Amino acid sequence: MKSLYKSVLAALLLTGAFNAQSQVPVLSSYPSATSVIFLDFDGHTVDNTAWNYNGPIYCGSSGMTNTQITEVFNRVAEDFRPFNVNITTDSAKYLAAPAANRMRVVLTDSSSWYGSAGGVAFVGSFTWGDGTPCFVFSALLNHNSKKVSEAASHEAGHTLGLYHQSTYNASCVKTSEYNYGQGTGEIGWAPIMGSGYTQNLTLWNNGPNSYGCNNIQSDLDVITNGTNGFTFRSDDHSATFAGATTATFSNNQFTVNGVVEQNTDLDMFKFTTTTAQRFILDAIPYNVGTGNSGSDLDMQVTLYNSAQTQLNVYNPGTLLSSVIDSILNAGTYYLKIEGKGNIYAPNYASLGSYSLAGSLSSATLPLRKLELRGVNNNDIHQLSWIIDADEQIEKQVLEFSNDGRNFETLTEPANNSRAYAYRPNFNGTIQYRLSVTFDNGRQYYSKVVTLRTAGTIAKPSLISNLISSNAIEVSSPGEYDYSIYDFNGKNLLKGKLTTGSNNITVPGASGGMYLIRFTNNTGQWIDKFVRQ
């Protein structure tokens, strides 16, 4: 029996003019691979396949520009980077591949023959060998490169044997056909086989599929189980100190690249400094824009000395990239690169490609140690720090952030102060860092410390974060103002809460993620909810 799966449509229809270039860029992610996923942007006639129950299907082009096409290719290629499969826009690569080891993804404006869906595919059709394609309906996704690429990887996943990643409650009742993930910002996460239109970090997942809470679908195992004719790529860098790849400096700089192919993969590199110098490393996952947009890898870097003793671990909690900035004595050092999870995303499929850019300079730092520490004691955040420096401190500023990117001043302690404690009026995760300015004008930051409040602060709360109508229920401990926004920041509704249960109707709420902000004289709190 052939299983048909269509993708969720999470976009409103818009009208407008979109013109594709006459020549689609010819791109391939892994030309040596035998198996092929062909992104077909320039139109195709589908005939003599499982789709053709009513004659040929004439599909127009995607209606996307070459710049958009290149972005979609790059996003999809990164989703499939761990595997020995070629993502390509070259029809010749598709036609040369074995019939039972290839898939054509038709990205087209033509959807009237099927209906209003982001895409559609037959589960397991990658191996059928009869030319049955899957489809992504670009016009119904507003020709949005991010959404089109998410749909393309999702539908290709269906053809490789994957079903939807779904969500269930504690009673094993399905709460959503699609797992919408969690979190916001750079590390906001969702499964590729769920719905990742609104999240930056979309990954393969190991979770319950649409056939029941106990049907755990390991996407990576399904894709590489041998049925589809390909598995993971070969490891490109050794996981041992003895086999570490040498990063050679040229003009005091080096650049190396790699791929984390599996969640057990460790890539080791080594480099040597001849004198005590300042070492800076930018460890950046592949991306298509700011905020590591389109990345599939949350990077962690570990630094070791020549004795293979660990010196430090670098993994900013709310960023996918990592940075080292340190004075190193002469000697040989090792870097270990691996994919990690974060507060939103599991470690399961933090996989993909990356680059390392290292540099040496003779600049000296005015301090030997700048270390910030923090503990949560009954929701009192107790922060302390160590500054070991020869220069005099001109100013120190303790900063905080709720998103890990935008920091604000919490307090400016006296120059001889080394501790600060307070009770935040915010439930959730808060990041802290210390900024220190010395009398020579140089400013330095400590590493970020993350603390989470336990939730003892009285505040309004949603009875449920998942709603099936336009009505939400809020329990409030007192009088608060509220504002509701869609995920583009548009304000939909404002009002006031009273003590107890409050029923609010959100006008015009369609499927997707929304924010509700509660405020009073002492602070503000933000929750999210999803309209199914």
Image (tube, rainbow, N blue to C red):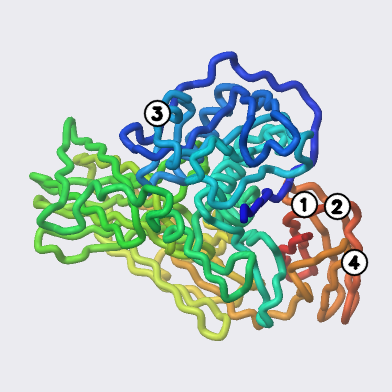
Residue with the mark numbered 2: 492
State whether residue 156 is above or below residue 467.
above
Q: Nearer the viewer, residue 218 or 251?
A: 218
Q: Earlier in the sequence, mark 2 or mark 4?
A: 2
State whether residue 341 is above or below residue 232.
below
Q: Residues within 10 Å of mark 1 (few under 14, many from 20)?
A: some
Q: CA distance from mark 2 to mark 3?
A: 52 Å
Q: Nearer the viewer, residue 7 or 302?
A: 7
Q: CA distance from mark 4 to mark 1?
A: 15 Å
Q: Earlier in the sequence, mark 3 or mark 4?
A: 3
Q: Earlier in the sequence, mark 4 or mark 1?
A: 1
Residue at horizontal 54%, vertical 67%?
207
Question: Where's the C terminus, which quadrant?
Answer: bottom right
Q: Earlier in the sequence, mark 1 or mark 2?
A: 1
Residue at horizontal 19%, vertical 35%?
252
Kindly state the secondary structure of the residue where label 3 is placed: helix
Q: CA distance from mark 3 to mark 4?
A: 58 Å
Q: CA distance from mark 1 to mark 3?
A: 46 Å
